[in-house]
Amino acid sequence: MERQRRGWLGTGLLIAGALVVAVAIVTGGTLARAVNGVAALLWFGSLWLVWTSLGSERRRLALTAVTVVTTLVLVLVVKPSDLFMAAVGFSIAGLIVSVAAGRSEVQWAAMVPALWLPVHLGVTIGRALTSASQG
């Protein structure tokens, strides 16, 4: 029961983080930068709670790999500003992870949006480092 509560709390934090990002987009400027920091903390906390709620499932490492790769493709292919394509992309990614997970599909599907920000930041940092080393 404790793991299930952690999962729901993590999902709630993820929703809160997304709402805070929406506020940052609407407000812009200095307030947006401050609010984005709060959103990032909520997002990373959510990722930790959701991931730890998955317990010690035998296939945890393999499912984590599937989720990371699926989320990486989502980050590379879909622009978050295109709401329709983002909805389609997240739905497809969640479906792929759910099918791979089988029995615990709901918790694993929550990992896709929870992983999105960390993967997005990793890709952005990687691109910046690549550009810096080439120029």
Image (cartoon, rainbow, N blue to C red):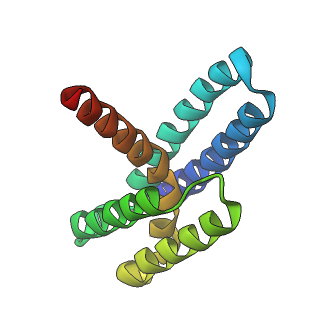
Q: Is residue 104 visible?
A: no
- Left or right of 132? Residue 45 is right
> In what quadrant of the picture does the C terminus appear?
top left
Q: Is residue 93 above or below residue 103?
A: above
Residue placed farthest to the right in the image? 26
| Rendered position, 35 above or below 93 | above
Q: Residue at x 44, y 52 (%)?
A: 115
Image point (69%, 68%), residue name:
84
Between 89 and 99, which is closer to the camera in this rendering?
89
Left or right? Give the position of 115 relative to 128.
right
Q: Quadrant of residue 108?
A: bottom left
Does residue 33 appear in the picture of this structure? yes
Front-lying residue, 27 or 135: 135
- The residue most toward the front is 135
Asked whether 28 or 134 is in front, the reply is: 134
Write the residue at 56% across / 55% down: 79
- Residue 32 position, x and y percent, is 70, 24
Residue at coordinates 60% horizontally, 48% vertically from top-left? 14
Near-viewer residue (12 or 29)? 29
Residue 110, x across and y down, in percent: 52, 62
Q: Disc count in the image?
A: 0
Residue 54 lies left or right of residue 5; in this view the side is: left
The x and y percentages for residue 45 are: 50, 38
121 versus 12 height, above or below: above
Question: Outermost residue toward the top?
Answer: 30
